[in-house]
Image (spheres, rainbow, N blue to C red):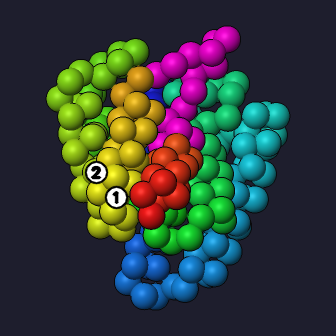
Amino acid sequence: MATDERLRRVFHVSGSWPVALYLLGWLAWPQVRLVYLAGIVTAVGLEALRLSGTVDWWVFERLTRDYEQTNPAGYALYVVASGVVALAFAPRIAVPAILLLAVVDPISGLLSAPERRPVKRPLALAVTFGLSGLIARLFVPLPAALAAAVVTTLADGATPVVRGYVIDDNVGIPVGAALAMWVALQVVG
């Protein structure tokens, strides 16, 4: 069965629900962290079952790409990386980093679909940079927002392969953007 890219994008956006509830004031940050911690445990458990062949659900067939069949799938990397960011950083940094993954990545994917290139086309890169900067700027000063935008564009815009393993932007975007904002805030205050 072929991967359903539209459904993958829906799952991407839906992964922002804990952050959305936090922004609406319906969850406190400690509760958000518990949700992400539970997500990490669940995703790691499901991936262990999937990769061992113990479970073979239709959802895995529809949402995993060819290169994910024998490697950790994007959804698990998404949940683990978002969870690490939520646990490691304050909301000022964690919220935009998670939103960059949940919102910018699927939009960039739409702009570059259906082709899969090692480096995305200039329009997709420009939109990724601009949208990332706008979202991050809602939470951090301009230098930190620009740092997050650069890292997000690099993580999303190129698909590096190391020893046959695709370095997934589901890790690079939230972790890289959070680290970039944190460093920029340390430097510029």
Task: Name the spot of residue 21 as percent of width and height, x first.
Answer: 44, 79
Residue 22 lies, in percent from the top left, at: 46, 79
- Residue range (magenta): 159-174
In this picture, is 31 found above or below 77?
Answer: below
Q: Residue tagged by mark 1?
A: 136
Q: Give neighbour class at mark 2: few <14, some 14-19, many 20+ (Cα, 10 Å).
A: many
Camera-nearest residue between 114 and 108: 108
Q: Residue 129: name its quadrant.
A: top left
Can you identify the residue that label 2 sits on? 133
x 21%, y 34%: residue:
126
Location of residue 134 in the rendering, given as x and y in whole percent from the top left corner: 24, 56
Tally of marks: 2
Residue that lies at the very extreme toward the top in this rendered image: 163
Q: Which residue lies at the image location 29% right of the left edge and 67% below the top edge?
A: 138
Q: Is mark 2 on a helix, strand or loop?
A: helix
- Decide if residue 7 is in sight here: no
Q: Is residue 63 above or below residue 185?
A: above
Give the residue drawn at x 57%, y 22%. 166
- On screen, residue 70 versus residue 58, left or right, reads right
Element at label 1: helix
Looking at the rendered structure, the kind of residue marked 1 is Ala
Q: How far apart are marks 2 and 1 (CA)?
A: 5 Å
**Along the horizontal axis of the image, is 135 left or right of 164?**
left
Dividing the picture into quadrants, the one containing residue 55 is: top right
Tell me: 92 left or right of 123.
right
Mark 1 surroundings: few (<14), some (14-19) or many (≥20) residues within 10 A: many
Q: Decide whether residue 54 is among the magenta residues.
A: no
| 163 in the magenta segment | yes
Q: Residue 117, located in which quarter of the rendered image?
A: top left
Contact? badges 2 and 1 (CB < 8 Å): yes
Q: Which residue is drawn at 49% across and 36% down?
A: 169
Residue type of the residue flagged with mark 2: Gly
